Image (cartoon, rainbow, N blue to C red):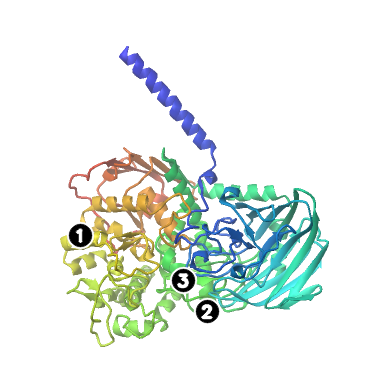
Amino acid sequence: MRKYSFIVVAITALFFNCAQNTHETKLKHTSFVNPFIGTDGPGNTYPGATVPFGMVQLSPDIGIPGWDRIAGYYYQDSIISGFSHTHLTGTGAGDLYDILVMPTNSRFNKRIEANNFKPFSKFSHEKEAAAPGYYMVDLLDYNIKAELTATERTGIHKYTFPKDSLSQIHIDLGYALNWDAPTDTYIKVIDSATIQGYRKSTGWARDQRVYFQIKLSKPFESYQLYKNDSLVQNEATGINTKIILNYKTKDDEVIILKTGLSTAGIDGACKSIALEAPHFKFDVYKKAADSIWEKQLRKIKIETNQLEKKKIFYSMLYQSMLAPTLLSDHNGNYKGANDTIVKAKGYNRYDTFSLWDTYRAAHPLYTVMHPKRVSDMIRSLLAHYKETGLLPVWSMQGNETNMMIGYHAVPVIVDAYFKGIKGFDIKLAYQACKASAMDDARQIEDYKELGYVPIDEHHENWSVSKTLEYAYDDWCVAQFAKALGKKADYDYFRERSENWRHVYDSKSTFMRPKFGDGSFVKPFVPKEYTPFFCESNAWQYMWYVPQNIEGLIGAVGGNEAFEKKLDSMFTLNPLPTDKLPIFSTGMIGQYAHGNEPSHHVGYLYNYVGKPWKTQEIIRNVLESQYKNTPNGHCGNEDCGQMSSWYVFSALGFYPVNPAQGIYAFGSPIFDRAVIKLENGRSFVIETVNDLKENKYIQSVVLNRKKIKRNYITHKEIINGGTLRFVMGNKPAPKSNYTMALSSKVYN
């Protein structure tokens, strides 16, 4: 009888699980994505419509400036001033917001100074929704429903109007927010359903150009065209131009507006609409955008009974694909970094390279998920080199912003080379890497002469951080030179890669700012935020020697001393009296997950034979620093880096040295994950005993063979196979698990 009861229960459970799994498989991966994550708090993301790596980011703008509204939108606000076509995702830079469109009618005409007296409407989150490639909101003061979707280079608006004799659509090129300011704008009325023009602006991107064509599903009855607030006819050129289109609408009448973009010319913008949005069937575009996202999100299929974690994972996977963004149009033309119109032949030109952030995990993730697209990204970096003589530092919209530090296009290129990414000129790539490393700008001249960047009077000297990050990039150049048989270059850059030792102070056991005469700065308080560390303090930059972790361990005094210092990093909590800058968020002791220099630190216990401590801290970060809420990011999302950290770490591994070709183990959080690779193979990650309390790896099996190491190689992933983690609720007994040498490339 007991045996029979057990069988009944087992069959019932099996049926229930099968039914649950069947239901889950029917749900689209896009249904798990929450585009509002990061729109509150410090995340600085936008909720609007875009497609993976697309030129158009069509999203609502509150219309009021400020740090919280860097991406145009802030979840705590209650008004919307329109929908503009370009936005940055998760940065601290207030730029773009091109071509603002706002539907209105006679029901409401209030204006406020806070948004520069632009039209606006109240809105409620109860009547707002977003999904990959789609955004919807009710503009409550007008009773107008606004819906947005996008193709790669075209934004599509759907406005459902109530009955009104003065329904209007405002198209405002003079609108500007935060750092952005128009320098020259142009509007021309082609016919009663077609408008063309351009918006040129300056800001973070000093010379930004957006050419557009707008097509409307319903001809406008009349219009008012303004040049600097004066009415003109047919066309307007000036710093501040706008047009108001007038309609009489019936109840629930729909007007579709399509905006094609190009950075090179109006012809390219026209072609964007002609090829990507030839009709006015909004739902067709919305469905197509959803399908494009679904295809990309399906590249990683996870299995878990924890729905919230599944939603966070796919939301992070979604956000990892919002940048870089397309720069070239269908003619192949784009605005080059040398301010000329350049043609990309045989590839898509990308920009928005937030390299100080994204070289750490986002670009390594792309080599796993999007190797074909990575080839175009590398060619884009090399195009920038051909246009300017240097690789980009932080490039956007065909401009070098020179924001942040390092020459981090180098590890992105070197990583792609060693991982076998095809389609780019290797000789040119090495030439570009070397040229950027040998340039004398940004204190590289001092660095070459002294072996470190000295303190100067600049408010963002960042001397220690520059020294450490230049040294890492030098290691990448050295490995590239070695692979190409350039021994003299290898020896030179390998020696430079050890320059971190020149700012290491053995007495304090910290990286410490130095004057040009070789003396260390006094006084020195490691937890203080000073101009000598880039958005960090000495605690957070202490660990930045990913090219020689063994050397750093030795300098600190060996495994035990290094472990104790790591322990202090995660337990030395800031005091209430400590002054923490805006970028010090996601704090665990002195560890700041809200900013990139800390992102690899939790994995360093692997290198001193204490992998269980890595497993503890990584699981802590995964569970405490990412939420399925608007304030679900603990810091700026930074063009895919914060989200890519989660994607890697949730799967169970992470690229501590981003150009090495290995991934250190952490603590996986899903029962099963399948990465569907572009080469047709699959890499499966299985987790046995996947319970919340089971954060510790007990054993690892790769392709049915038990392995005694704390890492997996990129080649092993790309070859396909199965990686199995057996988990437990206590640290595994002492074992001889080994970590790969941090200075060796595993290609």
Residue at 78% from the left image edge and 69% from the top image edge: 224
Do the residues bearing badges 3 and 2 touch, measured as CB atoms within 8 Å?
no
Q: Amino acid at mark 3?
A: Ala
What residue type is disc 1 on? Glu
Total marks placed? 3
Q: Is residue 44 left or right of residue 692?
A: right
> Residue beneath label 2, please?
388
Q: Give the SS element for disc 1.
A: helix
4 versus 573 height, above or below: above
Q: Quadrant of residue 687?
A: top left
Q: Which structural element holds mark 2?
A: helix
Question: In this rendering, which labeled residue sits more in front, label 3 or label 2?
Answer: 2
Question: Which residue in the protein does label 3 denote?
Answer: 429
Q: Position of residue 279 (x, y in %)?
A: 74, 53
447 or 7: nearer the eye? Answer: 7
Instruction: Judge by depth and name the residue closer to the eye, 284 or 124.
Output: 124
Question: Which quarter of the figure is the C terminus placed in?
Answer: bottom left
Position of 538 relative to 419 (above/below):
below
Q: Which badge, 1 or 2, is on the more N-terminal residue?
A: 2
Please name the residue shown 39% across and 50% down the image. Answer: 717
Q: CA distance from mark 1 to mark 2?
A: 44 Å
Name which of mark 3 and mark 2 comes first in the sequence: 2
Q: Which mark is residue 563?
A: 1
- Within 10 Å of disc 1 (Cα), the crowding (few <14, some 14-19, many 20+) is many
Look at the image and tell me whether residue 279 can be seen.
no
Task: Compute the Cα span from label 3 to label 2.
Answer: 14 Å
Gap in angstroms between the C-alphas marked 1 and 3: 38 Å
Residue 384 lies, in percent from the top left, at 53, 73
Q: Tell me which label, 1 or 3, sits earlier in the chain.
A: 3
Indicate the secondary structure of the residue bearing disc 3: helix
